[in-house]
Image (cartoon, rainbow, N blue to C red):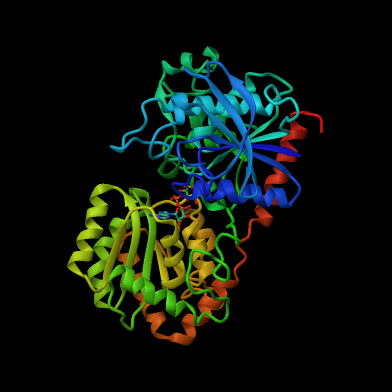
Amino acid sequence: MRVLFCAAECAPFVKTGGLGDVVAALPRSLLAQGVGVRVLMPKYRDAFAEIGATETVARFDALMGGPATVQAVRADGLELLLLDAPHLFDRPGNPYVQADGSDWPDNHLRFGALAHVAAAVATGTLDGDWRADAVHAHDWHAGLVPLYLSMQGAGAPPSMMTIHNIMYQGLFPGEVRAELGLPEQGFTPDGYEFHGQVGFLKAGLMYANKVSTVSPTYAEEIKTAAFGLGLEGVINHRGGDVVGILNGIDQEVWGPATDPLINSHYKAPNVKARAANRRQLNTRFGLTPGDGPLMCVVSRLTEQKGLDLLLNALPDFIKAGGKLALLGSGDRVMQQGFEDAALAYPSDVGTVIGYDEALAHQLQAGSDAIIVPSRFEPCGLTQMYGLRYGCLPIVAHTGGLADTVTDCDTDPNHGTGFVFTPVTQAALSDALMRAIACFADAPRWRGVMRRAMKQDLSWDASAATYIDIYGAIRADTGVAA
Ligand code: ADP
Ligand code: GLC
């Protein structure tokens, strides 16, 4: 079976969050199970400086306003197809936003072009030797893929749309449909229209053969207005076509026994080497070692992540003996809030504002716990990395957090972390206090840690589920094997 992935990120080349990790790890797991996966993504400036020679497999004289090529290359165990369209992607900085934080004004053309090329590659019109049996589109950036495929009529490969975060919907003024070559008859509430706008994610949800999201609990949550954020009607309309498939983690990239980004390696049940990693963190974050736990945050700083609740909970947390090391970037007010906290409590709170892959790994390998107080969380990867590294997760009971962490006070025999609900400062504070109390009982803490580190977080089972779905949608659409 051949599957084409279409996405805006793929680690380690381009990553702004969990999407990049998943678009690298899932294909590797699928490849290991015999699926021929290719990953189509934009060739951003600087992202691929080290991949070596590429092979041009397709050319466009005019793709949404300029010439473009598709280049194939094998890198990091993946078969990549890079859309090289300098007028769209040869720019500095972030894939989605310009230096001042506002969206690139031509994002509809950038990701419309990506989707258009995905549909062409998938049907074999570009590279005659390769045709996809199924296409897997990720998030709004690839939302037009199912629509462009549907425009090719019967015989086009079937598609699957995965929602990594329904908050980002890719909405653009209705007029852009002409530039994007979208069919007029689809510009209705039953099609790709969303309140007079062109909805990229909505198009994916309406035209894909199957829809998935990244945890079973989030798949239920997005049926409601509070989590569906306007798209709950579409999700309910698709009914049984929407499934929740839990993300896994790449255990080669994230494993404390071999991780090249950490200094002191260890393997459960012997976690003594964590102490050296912890000392390095204390130095890096300027913290004074104490008897209480060192907790970390590795996160985008957005409303979703609920870290404003943590800011407010800090005084009590510090009084109880907790220490905090935070790595994050995003919302300016929140950045300032954590920088101010580090100034106010210099020996107890350390803040690094920015994006630092190595430090993210080091925080998992040296902190005692990781705090993820999200208001919603489609899956969440940092709590899973925490489980694997013995950095116990303290999480809100929502989405994938609820599906991956078991509370050790409620369920002492199976608990792997601390879970709280509702997502309020009081409930978060209570969980932090419970964690501090548990940490003081060293044998008990070690027991929870041992269970956490044993949890199966691999991609194997979820990748097999995706393979079943690719097979099923292919059979439904009658595309010959
Ligand atoms: P989301 O995708 O919503 O941001 P996830 O938990 O799924 O949340 O994934 C976040 C990913 O991004 C993890 O790999 C995490 O380590 C990484 N990450 C988040 N913020 C930073 C940062 N400031 N520096 C380095 N890595 C980060
Ligand atoms: C999104 C979600 C996050 C999820 C990630 C990978 O960024 O916010 O919860 O883990 O995608 O699927």
**What is the quadrant of residue 418 in the picture?**
bottom left
Q: Is residue 29 depicted above or below 252 in this figure?
A: above
Q: State whether residue 269 appears in this view.
A: yes
- Residue occupying image coordinates x 48% and y 37%: 232
Image location of residue 117, percent across then percent down: 59, 26
Q: Is residue 333 depicted above or below 310 in this figure?
A: above
- Residue occupying image coordinates x 45% and y 36%: 45
Image location of residue 257, percent across then percent down: 57, 71
Left or right of 49, for residue 313: left
Image location of residue 447, percent across then percent down: 53, 81
Q: State whether residue 214 appears in this view.
A: no
Image location of residue 261, percent across then percent down: 49, 63
Q: Is residue 360 depicted above or below 447 in this figure?
A: above
- Residue occupying image coordinates x 45% and y 49%: 17
- Toward the right, the furthest residue is 481
**What is the quadrant of residue 81 in the picture?**
top right
> In the rendered view of the protein, which quadrant contains the C terminus?
top right
Q: Nearer the viewer, residue 64 or 234?
A: 64
- Toward the left, the furthest residue is 344
- Toward the front, the furthest residue is 53
Q: Nearer the viewer, residue 409 or 453?
A: 453
Q: Is residue 445 depicted above or below 119 in this figure?
A: below
* Total marks in image: 0
> In the rendered view of the protein, which quadrant contains the N terminus?
top right
